[in-house]
Image (spheres, rainbow, N blue to C red):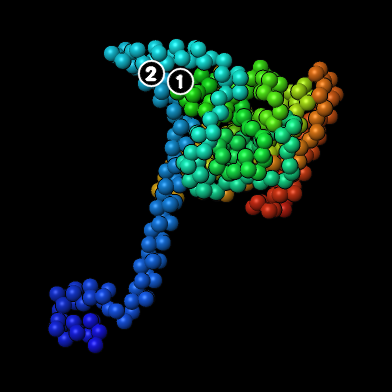
Amino acid sequence: MTVLSACRRRYPPGACGLRWRRWLQLLDLSDLDGRRGAFLQVRTKMNEAMKKHLESLCLFQWVLTFLFMGIFWTVVLFYLMFTSLWLIPVLYYIWVFIDRDTPERGGRCSSWLRNWVVWKYAKNYFPIKTIKTADLSPDRNYIFGCHPHGIMCTGAFYSFASNSTEFPQKFPGIRTTVAVLAGILRLPVYRDYMLLAGVCSVSKPSLDYVLSKNGTGNAVVIMIGGAAESLNCVPGEERVVLRNRKGFVRLALEHGADLVPVYTFGENNLFEQVVFEEGSWGRSLQMKFQKLVGFAPCIFKGRGVFSPNSWGLNPFAKPLYTVLGKPIRVPHIPVPSDEEVDRFHELYMEGLRELFEERKTQYGLAPAHQLHFI
């Protein structure tokens, strides 16, 4: 006789009896294996849900950092100047003055920050993968041309400013430095955070230093399309601003640094953006703002932190594949001519198109998808 059978005789039908019988069904030893399996299934689903929430939270901290950290600390330090804590911002700005040359000297990359576990959780939210197609010799220097820019350069950041996608293991001996607008590295506290991630200014003196004063095995990561490309970030469309962007090719020739085309498949699918037509008042306002501060404001939306069906600032959970193409060997020509720059610019465009065509169907695009150069 089972426990449940004995209880059926003792407790008559009724509300109280039914309540006890429901509880005692959990103690029915005749179906112990089945109940253990059900419990394990529930626990597995709960663990998966908690893991997803943790990944979403880790990503959200990066989104908040990217969008608001610089503005937040600018306001806080300005406020503290008029309180009894005025010495804190004074000492900080003294430090910034002493440290003013670091953004032009390749930053101060910290392996401790790049190995934060928070990057790995955030990377798994999408997930993001760095794909290797060819070896890179540590005896050479490189310029990685990254496309597309997207809203937040998500694929480039996690692949090259953190170790979450195991770039050092895939390309031993190669040190990546992500080049960003100099204005970003003037924002208090945010500048120090970014410098620790191995970020430097995209100015020519800064890039010259990394490619000439730091030995070999250096890879400068440049978002070629910049802010102009972010304005064309539309899901399902692959457009890159490249036709008239030749400064990075001239830089490569001046230092004999090989060019590596890099394309992140899925970058344009992370947000829904309001795209203003050329000539509209909205686009004109964006372009004026870009000329003034160096970047263009975008109107976009993503998903909520805990709910994929609500509006929010988190990117949509779409897979990203950052694919590094074959390096284009570049000779060292200290003073390259315009013809030489044009020739290697064409080679770079061909290499990028070849990379796109070879990999597009493998990473979620239809065979009819085309890469458009603007």
Residue 216 horizontal/vertical position (percent)? 71, 28
The amino acid on which the numbered mark 1 sits, given as a three-letter code, is Pro
The amino acid on which the numbered mark 2 sits, given as a three-letter code, is Leu
Q: Can you name the residue that lies furthest to the bottom here?
A: 1
Q: CA distance from mark 2 to mark 1?
A: 8 Å
**Above or below: residue 3 compared with residue 167:** below
Rendered-image quadrant of the N terminus: bottom left
Labelled disc at residue 334: none
Give the secondary structure at mark 2.
helix
Give the secondary structure at mark 1.
loop
Number of on-image labels:
2
Question: For this view, does 327 lie left or right of residue 233?
Answer: right
Sequence-wise, the earlier of marks 2 and 1 is 2
Q: Can you name the residue that lies furthest to the right here?
A: 339
Residue 4 horizontal/vertical position (percent)? 23, 81
Marks 2 and 1 close (CB-CB < 8 Å): yes
Name the residue tied to disc 1.
188
Name the residue tied to disc 2.
77
Residue 95 horizontal/vertical position (percent)? 46, 14
